[in-house]
Image: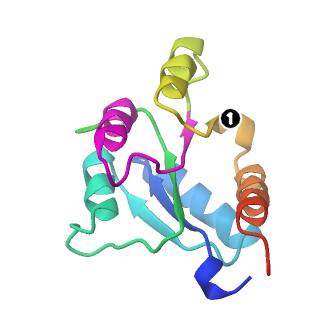
Amino acid sequence: MNDAQLLSLLLVEDDDVAAEAVMRGLRKYAHDCPVVPAEDGIAALQILRGKHDVRRIAKPYLVLLDLNMPRMNGFEFLHELRADNELGGTVVFILTTSGAEPDRARAYREHIAGYMVKSAVGPQCSGLARFLTEYRAAVFPAE
């Protein structure tokens, strides 16, 4: 896979411990996956629109989104994202503590690509890293 095919990840997560666990797992199992952190939906939209003061994300990318965040939660972010003509087709996977079926159903109504409960992914996020590596290989196969 050449550099142009690297899949960047926008990690939208307000919990520093959870964010670090995801990034540590990705570094260990998916070495070449660039990760851009966002502490909430507002920061994530700024990054995706190229209007953040510091952080940028390269294409192709996908969003790994927590649902429970301050300022703008995951559902508010999804609603805003889907309403944006340029960003509406962004691939989003939910990574949350909520296993509640109403949350899952609501997220899928916003056209997410997948829903993962943090406890099922594992403390080192190795399952998530393997999943993202396999997703990247399926969507962006080596030439």
Left or right placement of residue 113 versus residue 83 in this view: right
Q: Which amino acid does label 1 sit on?
A: Ser
Q: Which residue lies furthest to the top in this view?
A: 102
Question: Could you tell me which secondary element the residue under label 1 belongs to?
Answer: helix
| Residue furthest bottom in the image | 2
Of residues 139 and 28, the one nearer the viewer is 139
Label 1 belongs to which residue?
A: 119
Q: Where is residue 74 in the image (x, y as percent from the top left)?
A: 39, 36
Quarter location, residue 51: bottom left
* 65 or 134, nearer to the observer: 134
Residue at coordinates 32% horizontally, 47% vertically from top-left? Answer: 40
Image quadrant for the C terminus? bottom right
Check the picture and name the quadrant holding the N terminus: bottom right
Residue 65 place in picture, x, y as percent: 48, 44
From what the image shows, is residue 105 above or below residue 58? above
Q: Picture quarter containing residue 138?
A: bottom right
Q: Residue at x 55, y 74 (%)?
A: 34
Q: Is residue 60 magenta?
A: no
At x 73%, y 56%, the residue is 135
Provide residue 11's location: percent of width, then percent of height: 48, 56
> What is the span of residues highlighted in magenta in the rendered image?
73-96
